[in-house]
Image: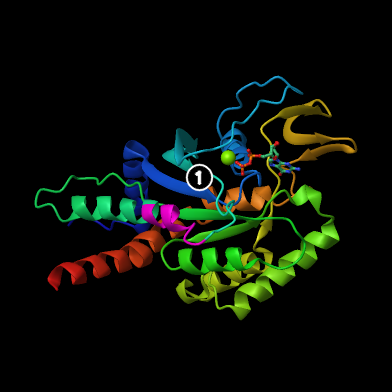
Amino acid sequence: LFGYVGIEAVLDQMKIKTMKTGFEFNIMVVGQSGLGKSTMVNTLFKSKVSRKASQPGQEEHIPKTVQLQSVTHVIEEKGVKMKLTVTDTPGFGDQINNENCWDPIIKYINEQYERYLREEILITRKRKIPDTRVHGCVYFIPPTGHWLRPLDLEFMRRLSKIVNVVPVIAKADTLTLDERAEFKQRIQEDLKTHAISVYPQEDFDQDPDDRVLNDLIREKIPFAVVGADQEHQVNGKRVLGRKTKWGIIEVENPAHCEFPLLRDLLIRSHLQDLKDITHNVHYESYRVRRLNESNR
Ligand code: GDP
Ligand code: MG
């Protein structure tokens, strides 16, 4: 009667709908002061958003971050509009006594779940609930080349239970390629020994194809990243990079660092998965916890 409506048509409709309404995607960056978090926020946007011309060589001074601060830009990827928000946080674990230093971060993440929950339980729900939930939390590991510090382990252990944690080796340009590889291996062992499950968690692989793809990513985690918010001229092209005595480290060049892997994971290949796991796993366990509390 109505003819056959193929799955492609359904997918197209879904795509048209998201294209019209757009969607929200929220990332948070966390770690000690001076590891390049604020720079990375700019790197993420500059590598995606229409290049804002900047004066080569003229370092923009990034002020020290003293409070939670969000930056939002609407970016378009293959005709789909996305409202990307990156929340920058002040140096974490800078104190002599770092007891409970993760509290403000955990509080922020839970507050966003709470907001969503309140909208969701209203009788007359909005057609589209504003989503400020953190879909990915990028944790900056200092490039010591040794082992993870107890603070790093404790943070990731706690946070990985409530949010998708994506660890990165900060300022990887300060390590040689061999040092990066060795450090990465140690971190992977450390995480395994302490049973800390960062994103993408093996438990949530959907099918064998997923597993194969995610295994490749798990081998490369934590990505050794370099951030920059300056553009330089390289072979007649403008590239985002850091100028050093020995040449320019191009942040978007996969031969120079793994920033491209981080960007692709977050805002391309795993964007929908990060959203799904946030909603189906992390938000869901928050919701169950809260509803149990109020039933008591
Ligand atoms: P935050 O405190 O974590 O927000 O760090 P900032 O982004 O403010 O950066 C602190 C300093 O480190 C600045 O001088 C940056 O230019 C520099 N920096 C940022 N990213 C990198 C990087 O990937 N490599 C190197 N070598 N320096 C970086
Ligand atoms: Mg900062």
Amino acid type assigned to the residue bearing label 1 in the image = Thr
Magenta span: 99-107
For the question of whether residue 2 can be seen, the reply is: no
Q: Position of residue 242 (x, y in %)?
A: 76, 36
Q: Is mark 1 within 8 Å of ligand 2?
A: yes
**Which residue appears at 65% of the width and 66% of the height?**
149
- Image vertical order of residue 149 relative to residue 20, above or below: below
**Which residue appears at 53% of the width and 63% of the height?**
155
**Which residue appears at 54% of the width and 68% of the height?**
154
Residue 43: image quadrant is top right
Queried whether the magenta region covers residue 190, the answer comes back as no
- Image vertical order of residue 294 relative to residue 21, above or below: below
- Image vertical order of residue 74 relative to residue 132, above or below: above
Q: Position of residue 143 (x, y in %)?
A: 73, 56
Most extreme residue toward the front, as rendered? 96
For the residue pair 145 and 56, the one nearer the viewer reads as 145
For the question of whether residue 59 can be seen, the reply is: yes
View quadrant of ligand 2: top right
Most extreme residue toward the right, as rendered? 246
In the image: residue 275, left or right of residue 149: left
Q: Position of residue 224 (x, y in %)?
A: 71, 55
Q: Position of residue 287 (x, y in %)?
A: 26, 64
**Which residue appears at 37% of the width and 46% of the height?**
15
For the residue pair 190 and 276, the one nearer the viewer reads as 190
Task: Give the SS element for disc 1.
Answer: loop
